[in-house]
């Protein structure tokens, strides 16, 4: 029946008391669900903060596991994936820092002292310096065994020069004597000519008086003419010696040229003698010696030296990070052998991109990276420490954000 419920139906044997249906309730949002949603946010934030500040605990974790920040990414965050940053540097590293492998070197790099040009088959006879000695430019460092033969050539050239100089003196003396003789001959010819002229005048007077014969007069005239010719001849001879200065006389010029040739020969012999000595090309410190007495000068040079008074660092920066590097930026250099950090500033940035020359200890590291070389000038204290570690490979950290922090 319409309007009746199961409780009002008289046909049912039992009296059913059904509960009233409850009203629908709204579900409450529980806070624990919000915490579940915030957990990934907290984890991401913690990872970012840890990567940025790198607290000591995280640093020790990286040290124990051998992992490094960003090492598994195609574009690492902090540094190239084949560089292991020393502990003392990692503690102060910032995300803006640029890191690269470095090599300590003297200013101007290492100077290789080779045998002189033209040494030929000479052997090393004597080493005059030791490792660590400070020498000036041009100082003798070693002698070769061809010195005695070259000294003999110098003595021979000196003797030849002495002969040529004596010949020049002899030529000058002979010309001066000839000039004096020509002058005396001219004076004598003039005196004879005056006497012949006087005799001719007397003979002409006697001939006019009929006292002297024609033959006598002709003889006087002939004698006077011969005397005049003798004067002209003596004057011409004297003119040959006095027309130009003594040094411009042809014989003197030839003798002077012979002396100049002998002097050139002597200078060449002395130059050859200097080739028997190995001299310092720069002022600096002897870093290494590659030869011993009795050996031929090796192809890599007899010794190496450098100006360790000002030490530098050559840093290889990956080409995708060089845009952040500028002159004057502070640089920290660290290596296990140093036991401390060195400091300096960027002095010069290379203009070319080349292949990586410094390789890390990792055998699987990339050895074909494209890098730009940056020269770093160490400060006085760091330079004194680095002077004992030429060619030491280290890790350099360039603080590219120092300028921005100073402006703030």
Image (spheres, rainbow, N blue to C red):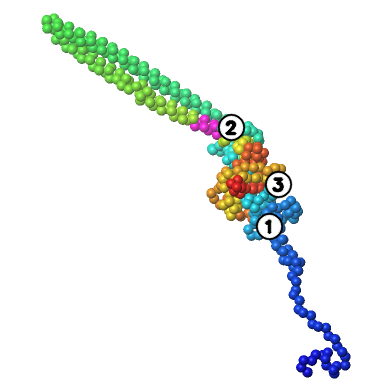
Query: Which element carries disc 3, helix, strand or loop?
Result: helix
Residue situated in front as seen by the camera: 110 or 92: 92
Looking at marks 3 and 2 on the same chain, the residue that comes earlier in the sequence is marked by: 3
How far from the left and from the top, in percent, is residue 75? 63, 58
Q: Is residue 278 visible?
A: no
Residue situated in front as seen by the camera: 112 or 200: 112
Residue 88 is marked as 3
How far from the left and from the top, in percent, is residue 199? 20, 8
Mark pair 1, 3: CA separation: 22 Å
Q: Which residue is mark 2?
A: 136
Looking at marks 1 and 2 on the same chain, the residue that comes earlier in the sequence is marked by: 1
Q: Residue at x 69, y 52 (%)?
A: 53
Residue 135 image-quadrant placement: top right
Q: Which residue is mark 1?
A: 48
Q: Residue at x 76, y 93 (%)?
A: 2
Q: Residue at x 63, y 37 (%)?
A: 380
């Amino acid at each position: 029946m319409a309007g009746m419920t199961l409780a009002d139906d008289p046909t049912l044997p039992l009296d059913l008391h059904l509960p009233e249906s409850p009203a629908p309730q709204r579900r409450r949002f529980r806070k624990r669900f919000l915490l579940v949603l915030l957990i990934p946010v907290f984890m991401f934030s913690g990872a970012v903060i840890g990567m940025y500040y790198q607290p000591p605990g995280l640093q020790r974790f990286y040290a124990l596991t051998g992992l490094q920040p960003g090492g598994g990414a195609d574009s690492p965050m902090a540094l190239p994936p084949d560089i292991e940053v020393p502990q003392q540097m990692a503690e102060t590293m910032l995300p803006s820092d640029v890191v690269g492998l470095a090599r300590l070197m003297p200013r101007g790099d290492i100077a290789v002292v080779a045998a002189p040009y033209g040494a030929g088959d000479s052997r090393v006879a004597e080493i005059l310096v030791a490792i660590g000695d400070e020498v000036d430019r041009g100082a003798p460092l070693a002698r070769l065994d061809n010195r005695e033969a070259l000294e003999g050539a110098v003595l021979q050239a000196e003797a030849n020069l002495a002969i040529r100089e004596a010949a020049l003196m002899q030529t000058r003396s002979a010309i001066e004597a000839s000039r004096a003789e020509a002058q005396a001959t001219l004076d004598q010819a003039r005196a004879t000519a005056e006497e012949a002229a006087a005799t001719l005048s007397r003979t002409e007077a006697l001939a006019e008086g009929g006292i002297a014969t024609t033959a006598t007069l002709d003889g006087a005239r002939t004698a006077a003419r011969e005397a005049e010719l003798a004067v002209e001849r003596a004057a011409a001879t004297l003119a040959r010696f006095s027309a130009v200065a003594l040094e411009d006389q042809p014989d003197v010029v030839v003798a002077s040229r012979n002396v100049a040739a002998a002097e050139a020969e002597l200078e060449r012999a002395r130059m050859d003698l200097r080739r028997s000595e190995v001299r310092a090309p720069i002022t600096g410190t002897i870093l290494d010696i590659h030869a011993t007495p009795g050996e031929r000068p090796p192809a890599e040079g007899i010794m190496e030296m450098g100006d360790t008074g000002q030490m530098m660092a050559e840093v290889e920066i990956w080409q995708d990070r060089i845009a952040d590097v500028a002159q004057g930026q502070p640089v920290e250099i660290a290596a296990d052998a140093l036991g401390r950090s060195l400091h300096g500033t960027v002095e010069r940035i290379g203009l070319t991109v080349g292949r990586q020359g410094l390789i890390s200890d990792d055998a699987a590291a990339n050895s074909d990276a494209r890098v730009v070389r940056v020269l770093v000038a160490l400060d006085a204290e760091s330079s004194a420490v680095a002077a004992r570690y030429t060619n030491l490979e280290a890790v350099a950290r360039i603080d590219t954000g120092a300028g921005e922090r100073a402006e703030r």
